Amino acid sequence: MNKRFKILAVALTAALPAFAHGADRGEAKAKVAGKAVTIDYGRPSLKGRDMLGQAKVGQPWRMGADSSTTLKTEADLQMGALAVPKGDYVLSATKVAEDKWELNLAKSGDNAVLGSVPLVADKASDSVETFTIELTGKGDAGELVLKWGTTVLKTGFTGK
């Protein structure tokens, strides 16, 4: 009987990670210049916290939970002064001053830093409990919007 209990205990312990539940994943999609642009990200909830208010100036934030936020683009993008060739990227954001943020892009796989783009900060009229990324596209133009709590961060871009 003791041997059966040990086998069951080992099996249950090994299976626990499969039952662990992190934050839900989200996906934002848009067509820009007729091509797909997709962001995959974790969707943590505030649960009464002010997470972006706690962010330290100069420290990158993963923009989500559990695993990296990724951008896959079939179009060459222009985000401000930053040229983003079609491909796969890891996104993060950095608070550069109390009310200023920038979006950071690194090439997926080798993590080579491509560059950063300023984000326009705004206040939401209603608090957003679960971190949300929105992508919109119209013709060659697109917009990326991050929402969490009462903070809205956004940047426009074009594609070709």
Image (cartoon, grey):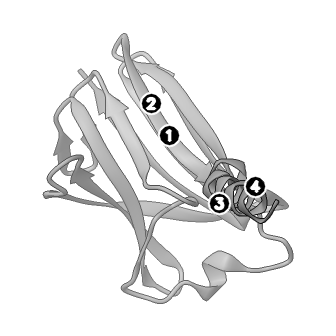
| Mark seen at residue 40 | 1
Q: Where residue 38 is drawn, which disc sits there?
A: 2
- The residue where tag 3 is placed is 10
Amino acid type shown at disc 4? Arg
Labels 3 and 2: the sequence-earlier one? 3
Q: Residues within 10 Å of mark 3 (few under 14, many from 20)?
A: few
Residue assigned mark 4: 4
Q: Amino acid at mark 3?
A: Val
How crowded pointer 1 is (Cα within 10 Å; few <14, some 14-19, many 20+) is rated as many
Eye-nearest disc, 1 or 2 = 1
Instruction: Point out the tag, 3 or 1, that comes first from the N-terminus.
Output: 3
Q: Is residue 84 left or right of residue 35?
A: left
Q: Earlier in the sequence, mark 2 or mark 4?
A: 4
Q: Earlier in the sequence, mark 4 or mark 3?
A: 4
Of circles 3 and 2, the one toward us is: 3
Q: Quadrant of the N terminus?
A: bottom right
